[in-house]
Image: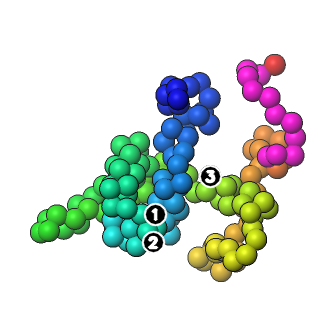
Amino acid sequence: MKNLSNQPCLIARSLAIVGDAWSMLIMRDAHTGLTRFDEFRKSLGIAPTMLTARLSALTDDGLLEKHRYSERPPRDEYLLTQAGRDFLPVLFAIGAWGRKHRSGGEVTRFFDAETGTEIDAVTIDRVTGAPVGTRPIRIGAPE
C-alpha cells in the first residue's frame, strides 16, 4: 500500500495516523479520562505489545503526550494534546454512522457530563449550514 501520510487527500493523511480500530478505541477511551497503560489494556482487552505500539504511534503523531507520573517504578500516563481533543468530533461522526447502520442489539451510549443529555452528533458544513452527506460532493479545487 502507498504511504498514505504523503497523499494530497487529508482523509488519507489522517487515516495514516488513526486508521485502525485500536487507535480509534484508544482515542475514545482517552476522551473518557483514561490515561494509564493498564487502564487502556483493561478497557480494550488489547495485547500489551499492540497497545505499546499504538500508544507510541499516537504519541509520535501528536494526539497524545506521554508524561511520567512515577519514577519508581517508572510509569507514564498518556494525555490528550490539542490535536487529540480535536479528534472527538471524528469519533462522534463515526458513532453517528454506526447508530444509523449498525445499531442492532445493545449499544454504548454517550452523555454530556454537564447536562446528562445523550449526545446525538450531527456533522454540519460551516459555510452552508447543511448537514454533511445531504448534498453531492466532488474532489478537487474550487471552480
Query: Residue 17 at x, y = what percent?
Result: 48, 42
Name the front one of labels 2 and 1: 2
* Quarter holding residue 88: bottom right
- Magenta segment: does it hold 15? no
Query: Residue 140 at x, y = what percent?
Result: 73, 22
Q: Sequence order check: which comes first, mark 3 or mark 2?
A: 2
Tag 3: residue type?
Val
Q: Residue furthest bottom?
A: 116
Query: Looking at the image, which is closer to me, 82 or 90?
Result: 90
Residue under circle 2?
A: 43
Q: Main secondary structure of the magenta part?
A: loop
Q: Which residues are magenta?
A: 132-142
Tag of residue 30:
1
Q: Secondary structure at mark 3?
A: helix
Q: CA distance from mark 2 to mark 1?
A: 11 Å
Tag 1: residue type?
Ala
Question: Residue visible at 65% across and 80% down?
Answer: 116
Query: Residue 10 at x, y = what percent?
Result: 60, 33
Q: Sequence order check: which comes first, mark 3 or mark 1?
A: 1
Residue under circle 3?
A: 90
Question: Residue visible at 14% across and 68% down?
Answer: 73
Q: Secondary structure at mark 2?
A: helix
